[in-house]
């Protein structure tokens, strides 16, 4: 059995039409799965069972806002709105969704400091984390959850 991978998804609030994850919004009442579309670089490698981190890019809160597991392999859903580029997606099972109004996010600055060769600021969504960075990001996430007293499978 192949090891699962880590896929980094990016949420650019001014450009992303597919996520509506503001805390308290009825659309974030998770009763199972969440569908995510993205324009990924490594979409062919995204498989059911892979781990994901969703990075939010906002002026005041840029960092990891969600973590979970891909529930399906990535597949083509048609063209990206207004372009001829392909739009791909998967179903997500989130196990943590962080409210940036309540908690400081695990920032891209901290991620860059620990994993400088991964491009955290630009590039496509859906890129995979490889090598020693898999262990580093998992350790950073675990420490972040412990430091903020956030339990697994929580939407805080």
Image: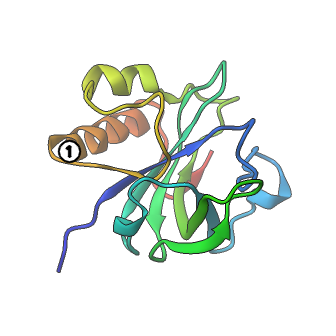
Of 37 and 146, nearer the camera is 37
Q: Position of residue 25 (x, y in %)?
A: 83, 51
Q: Quadrant of the N terminus?
A: bottom left
Residue in the foreground of this view, choosing between 136 and 11: 11
Query: Where is residue 85 drawn, in percent x and y?
Result: 61, 58
Among the 4 quarters of the image, the one containing residue 65: top right
Give SS at disc 1: helix
- 121 relative to 134, above or below: above
Dot 1: within a 10 Å radius of its alpha carbon, few (fewer than 14), some, or many (20 or more) residues?
few
Instruction: Name the image quarter holding residue 29.
Output: bottom right
| Residue at (40% x, 30% y) in the render | 147
Q: Is residue 35 above or below residue 148?
A: below
x and y percent of residue 7 in the render?
39, 54
Whether residue 124 sits left or right of residue 79 in the image: it is left
Taking the image as shown, residue 16 lies to the left or right of residue 108, namely right
In percent of the image, x 47 and y 59: which residue is there?
68
Asked whether, in this view, residue 98 is left or right of residue 115, the answer is right
On the rendered image, what quadrant is the C terminus found in? top right
In percent of width and height, residue 151 lies at: 47, 49
Q: Is residue 8 above or below residue 31?
A: above
Which residue is tagged 1? 135
In the drawing, does residue 68 fall left or right of residue 30? left
Colour mapping: rainbow
Q: Residue extending furthest right?
A: 26
Location of residue 148 with respect to 124 vertically, above or below = above
Taking the spot 38% from the left edge, 60% from the top edge, the residue there is 51
Query: Could you say which quadrant of the image residue 76 lies in?
Result: bottom right
The residue at the point 33 percent across, 55 percent down is 6
């Amino acid at each position: 059995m192949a090891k699962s991978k880590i896929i980094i998804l990016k949420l650019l609030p001014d450009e992303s039409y597919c996520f509506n994850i503001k805390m308290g919004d009825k659309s974030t009442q998770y009763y199972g799965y969440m569908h995510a579309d993205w324009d990924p670089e490594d979409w062919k490698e995204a498989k059911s069972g892979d781990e994901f981190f969703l990075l939010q890019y906002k002026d005041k809160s840029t960092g990891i806002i969600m973590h979970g597991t891909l529930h399906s392999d990535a597949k083509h859903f048609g063209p990206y709105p207004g372009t001829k580029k392909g739009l791909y997606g998967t179903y997500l099972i989130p196990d943590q969704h962080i409210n940036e109004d309540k908690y400081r996010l695990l920032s891209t600055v901290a991620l860059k400091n620990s994993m400088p060769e991964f491009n955290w600021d630009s590039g496509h969504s859906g890129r995979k984390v490889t090598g020693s960075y898999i262990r580093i990001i998992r350790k950073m996430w675990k420490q972040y959850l412990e430091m903020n007293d956030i339990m697994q499978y929580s939407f805080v």
